[in-house]
Image: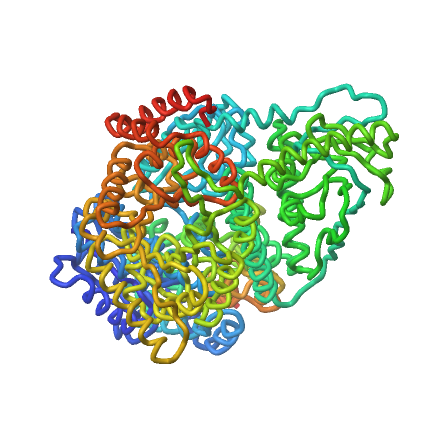
């Protein structure tokens, strides 16, 4: 079952809502090892995205995702602005002029997006960042596509992988971003960026899995 | 014009910095744009890549745009903004890693001067160095500074030179130290590697350079990246051409050769390496080196560990500096050993490795330090070069000192009984601390021909045989021993005839030595009856004792700086009085010339908080500083004048360049005398006040000064430096630093003639006075008093006794007409040969 433009729009709306609901939770995670603004920043960014969506709702998927990226860059404020901004801009480049995507197209698009994000943040798996949730989720999706699983199962497995990746950040020592200033003391706390990335896949599952 | 963009989370912060930048830029054409805050309101703390792009576009110039960022997302957003720009513009925009505030101010200044983008970026990136320097001086540690000096370079083209190392021992301690010192003068990132070996090391790290193990005729490749890369490479090239400061040092070769081990030994004797000449008969004092046991302990607070570390390091640095200065007064070459130690103690690679271990493994600093020292020792031990392998001993020595300081132990047992030291190996620091009055001789199991302890033993005049082998370990305390430091022989429990034989040799050796000493206290008078006073340059009370032991006719120069160095506040009047008084009392009725404080940018005192000067030798030093700082000058004068009561103390003012300075200084001295008298403090009726002639202006106008001064003293080192515009201590202009240059001699004649016309006397108190080739010329020119390091006095007096004034006057006349210092030296060598004196 292809992913339509409306599916993409609904994913973005669901993600906005989840971020709004988890604003305090993310901020609380960030207050342990960062500057206590991740929830606030992401919520502000995606509220701005919600405001922006009606102006691009009739455009192709690429245009929508690029618009999301630019909005995040301008409104999030913290490091997640340019990072998620890069993710959506790059995903938008890969989906330019597309009105619908196969799951494989989508995997290719977010693969390139995650590579760009990692280059922007100079982060790798194990650095206690959003990458720790994104990469396992992506790999699970790829594997599911290769195994010929259906979309519902593929999304489920990617969310499980993202959640595991997010939890794996708890014992890690941060090597990038503000949390790295804490060095060893960053261990024992879940990374807020990995959490918001997990929520992004969770939103995908919610939006695209029809009951 | 290079324009500037500030990227900040906070618009208030950015606005404040812009205000500060405007202050230093005045009417400049430089444009500044700010991209601060996220969200349209700009009230949200954060950064926005689109806003940054707009700011760059707003001030874009083909000369370039420098972008300064605060932190975190500012960097990410700025990188992203760069991606938004067209490629041709992107290449003219530089994201700069400079500290935000300091970098912005430095960039504003450079940009407003019309500097290039590279230059503006380099200045901004170096902007923290002065803050680090001033704070590390306060804290008494410079551990942080060198680490930052290896910050990523400005990206410009890499320049390279290939050099051949011609030094016989390769790039060993002293040449390597000079190489590193020279490289460190430049901002560029400088790397060095062996030719055909891709492994490059930081040329500013002594440890890294020395560990390359460069041997004679090895080719090295030096690469430099940065604004002053070309200058840096040129300087290093010059250094290599001058054999890294060893060009005319044949003694290094001779010394090494004399230390070589012979193979056979007479029956009953053990053969070692003759390390220091002389004989010793005595009983064994057996020392055992005990390596402290270091445990690996988990710690909670790396910061506290690093503070303990820097305190211990500073203590060892300070002690090492003292030892170095003590040795340097008579043996500048040997003192370089300790310069190498100091460099190891400040080596950025070493210090950051320790810090990494402490912080990452969360272990005690003793453990971390031991790991780093052991690693370094292994590197040196594995090198294919005898000389470098011997350096492993030095590093172990430094390592042990820091360790014992951290643990609060002392390394080697204090020697309090007289005898011959028997030990497996003796570190240079231990050797330097030995008391030559108690230690008759040294015998070591290990030790190599190039060991620094061997060299130091010579310096201290202690007979030594090193590397004797395992038999030494069997020697029990109190065993009778004989050390033959000429032949490299050790006799353990010698028979009667050998003992008698050596007792006779020792007596003869000692009497020769003592005859020289005895003669040294006799006056030095030329063959035609002209008395020349030979006095000592000293720095403290111990030197004063050495001066008397060597037959000094007085003190020609008491440097008072030692009282002011290595402390956090200036010494007060009473403390100074005690020292001056003690020295004057020791010298009894011999004259003591006390030079007022000679410090400044070249010898900075942290508590004076002097501004950094670009050219400290041309800056506010000596009397220039004292006239500006009566709080420093007055207490010193009061202390000197009080000590003068009942003694022959004379006051000497350094660095007088202009009659106005002299008159102000003299007035302050006179005021101080009146003040003391009003307070009923005894002051002699007459205190002579003279000036140093170190600046050509003072020499040229000596006839103006002569009626107003009581004496002149020529500081030949500085006079040479200022006459030939060649900085002392800068090896690349060392060839100009010869006080026998006719340009210097002509000034000395000028001073002597002006002084004679006014009935005043002239002394010379620089290195020139002790120079065997210069001494006859100085006497010939009419100099009445020579002042030098105590150890040089006996020989100088003996030389004076061989001279005839009429001859040396003619020599001086002829020398003044020659074209160069070299020509003067060649001429004087010939003349000395005619009177049967060796050429010196």
Which of the 4 image quadrants contains residue B619?
A: bottom left
Count the labels in the image. 0
Residue A125 in the image: x percent, y percent? Answer: 54, 53
Q: Nearer the viewer, residue B125 or B408?
A: B408
Q: Residue at x 76, y 40 (%)?
A: B424
Residue reaching furthest to the front: B529
Residue B328 in the image: x percent, y percent? Answer: 51, 44
Q: Nearer the viewer, residue A20 or B166?
A: B166
Q: Nearer the viewer, residue A81 or B265?
A: B265
Residue reaching furthest to the bottom: B679
Give the answer, above or below, for where B613 lies relative to B811. Answer: below
Q: Residue at x 33, y 71 (%)?
A: B673
**Horizontal side of residue B51 vs A7, given as left or right:** left
Q: Nearer the viewer, residue B111 or B288?
A: B288
Judge whether residue A113 can be spotted in this image: no
Q: How is the image coloured?
A: rainbow
Residue B15 in the image: x percent, y percent? Answer: 24, 71
Q: Residue at x 27, y 32 (%)?
A: B742
Give the answer, above or below, for where B263 lies relative to B214. Answer: above
**Horizontal side of residue B304 vs A52, given as left or right:** right
Give the answer, above or below, for where B494 lies relative to A79. Answer: above
Judge whether residue B543 can be spotted in this image: yes
**Horizontal side of residue B829 vs B794, given as left or right:** left
Residue B649 in the image: x percent, y percent? Answer: 41, 60
Q: Residue at x 75, y 20 (%)?
A: B263
**Horizontal side of residue B337 vs B766, given as left or right:** right
């Amino acid at each position: 079952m292809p992913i339509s433009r409306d599916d993409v729009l609904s994913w973005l709306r669901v993600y906005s809502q989840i971020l709004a609901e988890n604003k305090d939770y993310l901020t609380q995670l960030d207050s342990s090892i960062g500057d206590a603004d991740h929830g606030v920043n992401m919520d502000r960014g995606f509220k701005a995205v919600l405001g922006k969506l009606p102006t691009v709702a009739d455009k192709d998927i690429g245009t929508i995702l690029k618009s999301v990226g630019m909005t995040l860059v301008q409104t999030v404020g913290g490091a997640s602005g340019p990072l998620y901004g890069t993710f959506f801009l790059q995903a938008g480049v890969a989906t330019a002029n597309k009105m619908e995507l196969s799951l494989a197209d989508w995997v290719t698009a977010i693969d390139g997006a995650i590579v760009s994000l990692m280059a922007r943040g100079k982060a790798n798996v194990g650095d206690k960042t959003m990458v720790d949730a994104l990469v396992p989720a992506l790999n699970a999706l790829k594997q599911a596509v290769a195994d010929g699983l259906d979309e519902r199962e593929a999304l489920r497995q990617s969310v499980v992988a993202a959640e595991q990746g997010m939890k794996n950040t708890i014992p890690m020592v941060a090597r990038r971003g503000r949390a790295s200033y804490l060095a060893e003391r960053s261990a024992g706390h879940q990374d807020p960026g990995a959490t918001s990335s997990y929520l992004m896949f969770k939103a995908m599952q919610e939006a695209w899995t029809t009951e | 014009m290079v324009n500037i963009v500030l990227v900040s989370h906070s618009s208030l912060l950015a606005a404040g910095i812009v205000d500060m930048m405007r202050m230093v830029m005045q009417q400049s054409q430089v444009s500044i744009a700010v991209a601060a805050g996220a969200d349209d309101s700009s009230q949200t703390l954060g950064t926005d890549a689109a806003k940054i792009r707009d700011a760059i576009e707003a001030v874009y110039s083909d000369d370039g745009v420098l972008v300064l960022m605060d932190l975190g997302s500012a960097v990410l957003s700025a990188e992203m903004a760069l991606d938004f720009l067209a490629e041709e513009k992107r290449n003219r925009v530089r994201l700069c890693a400079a500290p935000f505030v300091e970098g912005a101010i430095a960039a504003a200044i450079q940009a407003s001067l019309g500097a290039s983008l590279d230059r503006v970026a380099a200045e901004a990136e170096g902007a923290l160095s002065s803050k680090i320097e001033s704070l590390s001086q306060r804290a008494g540690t410079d551990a942080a500074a060198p680490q930052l000096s290896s910050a990523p370079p400005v990206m410009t083209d890499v320049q390279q030179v290939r050099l051949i190392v011609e030094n016989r021992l390769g790039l060993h301690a002293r040449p390597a130290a000079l190489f590193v010192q020279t490289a460190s003068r430049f901002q560029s990132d400088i790397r060095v590697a062996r030719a055909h070996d891709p492994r490059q090391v930081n040329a500013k790290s002594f440890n890294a350079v020395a560990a390359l193990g460069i041997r004679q005729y090895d080719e090295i490749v030096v690469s430099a990246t940065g604004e002053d890369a070309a200058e840096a490479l040129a300087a290093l090239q010059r250094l290599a051409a001058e054999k890294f400061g060893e060009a005319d040092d044949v003694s290094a070769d001779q010394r090494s050769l004399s230390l070589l081990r012979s193979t056979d030994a007479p029956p009953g004797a053990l053969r070692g390496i003759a390390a220091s000449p002389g004989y010793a008969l005595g009983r064994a004092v057996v020392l055992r080196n005990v390596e402290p046991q270091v445990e690996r302990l988990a710690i909670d607070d790396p910061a506290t560990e690093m503070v303990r570390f820097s305190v211990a390091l500073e203590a060892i640095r300070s002690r090492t500096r003292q030892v170095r200065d003590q040795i340097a007064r008579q043996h500048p070459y040997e003192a370089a050993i300790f310069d190498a130690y100091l460099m190891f103690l400040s080596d950025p690679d070493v210090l950051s490795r320790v810090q990494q271990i402490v912080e990452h493994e969360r272990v005690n600093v003793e453990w971390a330090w031991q790991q780093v020292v052991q690693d370094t020792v292994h590197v040196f031990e594995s090198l294919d070069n005898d000389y470098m392998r011997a350096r492993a001993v030095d590093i172990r020595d430094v390592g042990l000192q820091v360790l014992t300081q951290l643990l609060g132990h002392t390394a080697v047992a204090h020697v309090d009984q007289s005898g011959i030291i028997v030990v497996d190996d003796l570190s240079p620091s231990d050797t330097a601390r030995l008391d030559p009055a108690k230690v008759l001789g040294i015998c070591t199991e290990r030790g190599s021909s190039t060991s620094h302890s061997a060299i130091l033993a010579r310096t201290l005049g202690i007979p030594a045989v090193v590397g004797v082998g395992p038999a030494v370990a069997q020697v029990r305390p109190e065993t009778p021993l004989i050390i033959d430091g000429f032949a490299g022989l050790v006799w353990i429990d010698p028979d009667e005839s050998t003992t008698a034989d050596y007792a006779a040799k020792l007596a003869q050796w000692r009497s020769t030595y003592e005859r020289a000493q005895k003669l040294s206290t006799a006056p030095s008078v030329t063959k035609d009856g002209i008395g020349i006073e030979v006095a000592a340059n000293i720095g403290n009370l111990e030197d004063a004792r050495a001066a008397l032991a060597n037959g000094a006719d007085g003190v020609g120069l008491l440097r008072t700086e030692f009282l002011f160095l290595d402390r956090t506040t200036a010494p007060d009047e009473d403390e100074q009085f005690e020292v001056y008084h003690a020295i004057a009392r020791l010298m009894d009725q011999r004259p003591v010339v006390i030079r007022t404080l000679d410090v400044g940018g070249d010898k900075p005192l942290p508590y004076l908080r002097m501004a950094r000067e670009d050219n400290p030798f041309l800056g506010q030093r000596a009397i220039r500083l004292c006239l500006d700082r009566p709080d420093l000058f007055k207490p010193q004068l009061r202390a000197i004048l009080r000590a003068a009561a009942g003694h022959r103390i004379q006051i000497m003012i350094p660095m007088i360049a202009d009659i106005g300075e002299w008159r102000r200084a003299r007035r302050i001295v006179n005021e101080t005398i009146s003040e003391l008298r009003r307070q009923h403090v005894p002051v002699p009726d007459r205190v002579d006040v003279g000036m140093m002639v170190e600046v050509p202006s003072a020499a040229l106008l000596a006839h103006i000064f002569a009626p107003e001064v009581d004496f002149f003293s020529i500081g030949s080192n500085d006079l040479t430096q200022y006459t030939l515009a060649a900085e002392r201590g800068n090896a690349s202009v060392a060839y100009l630093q010869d006080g026998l240059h006719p340009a210097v001699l002509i000034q000395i004649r000028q001073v002597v003639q002006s002084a004679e016309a006014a009935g005043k006397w002239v002394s010379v108190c620089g290195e020139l006075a002790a120079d065997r080739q210069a001494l006859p010329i100085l006497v010939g020119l009419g100099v009445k008093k020579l002042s030098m390091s105590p150890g040089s006095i006996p020989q100088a007096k003996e030389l004076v006794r061989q001279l005839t004034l009429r001859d040396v006057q003619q020599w001086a006349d002829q020398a003044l007409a020659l074209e160069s210092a070299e020509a003067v030296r060649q001429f004087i060598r010939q003349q000395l040969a005619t009177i049967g004196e060796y050429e010196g």
